[in-house]
Image (cartoon, rainbow, N blue to C red):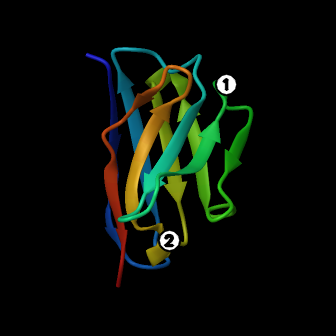
C-alpha cells in the first residue's frame, strides 16, 4: 500500500528541537523532489521546505530559514525535517509531500508551548 508516514512530532518547549521523519512505503522516493508543508489552525497550508531528488538543492520558507533543515536518505526511502529553535508560531500539523507523484502523508502534530 502506498504510504507516507510521518513521525517524530509532539510537544516541545520554545527553543527546543524536533526531527520529523517521513518514511515512504509502496513506492520509492529516489526520483522525486520531496517537501514538507504545514498547516496551523484556521490558516492555509504553507510550504516549509523542499529538497531535490538527489539532495543537491534545498529551499525553505522565509519563516524557517536558518532554523529548519530538510534532508533525505534515499536508501532508507525517508525524508527528514530537523527543526531547531522552535517557536509557538511553528505549531501546526506538518505534512510530507512527494512532488510530481502528488502524494501526501496524513500529517503529524507539532506543538510548541511552555
Question: Which part of the image, by quadrant, shows the N terminus?
Answer: top left
Question: Which part of the image, by quadrant, shows the C terminus?
Answer: bottom left
The residue indicated by pointer 1 is 54
Q: Position of residue 14 (x, y in %)?
A: 45, 79
As displayed, is residue 9 above or below residue 11?
Answer: above
Residue lying at the far right of the rendered structure: 57
As displayed, is residue 73 above or below residue 41?
Answer: above
Per the model, the C-alpha gap separating discs 2 and 1 is: 27 Å
Q: Nearer the viewer, residue 16 or 36?
A: 36
Q: Residue at x 33, y 15 (%)?
A: 26
Q: Position of residue 28 (x, y in %)?
A: 46, 16
Q: Position of residue 61 (x, y in %)?
A: 65, 55
Q: Secondary structure at mark 2?
A: loop
The residue indicated by pointer 2 is 86
Please tell me the numbered disc located at residue 22: none
Q: Classify mark 2: residues with Cα within 10 Å, few (<14), some (14-19) or many (20+).
A: many
Q: Quadrant of residue 56?
A: top right
Amino acid at each position: 500500500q502506498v504510504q507516507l508516514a510521518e513521525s517524530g512530532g509532539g510537544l516541545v518547549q520554545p527553543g527546543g528541537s524536533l526531527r520529523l521523519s517521513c518514511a515512504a512505503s509502496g513506492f520509492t522516493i529516489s526520483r522525486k523532489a520531496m517537501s514538507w508543508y504545514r498547516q496551523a489552525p484556521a490558516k492555509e497550508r504553507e510550504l516549509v521546505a523542499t529538497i531535490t531528488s538527489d539532495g543537491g538543492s534545498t529551499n525553505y520558507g522565509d519563516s524557517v530559514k536558518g532554523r529548519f533543515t530538510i534532508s533525505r536518505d534515499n536508501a532508507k526511502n525517508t525524508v527528514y525535517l530537523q527543526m531547531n529553535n522552535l517557536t509557538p508560531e511553528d505549531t501546526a500539523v506538518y505534512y510530507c509531500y512527494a512532488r510530481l507523484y502528488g502524494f501526501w502523508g496524513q500529517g503529524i502534530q507539532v506543538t510548541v508551548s511552555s
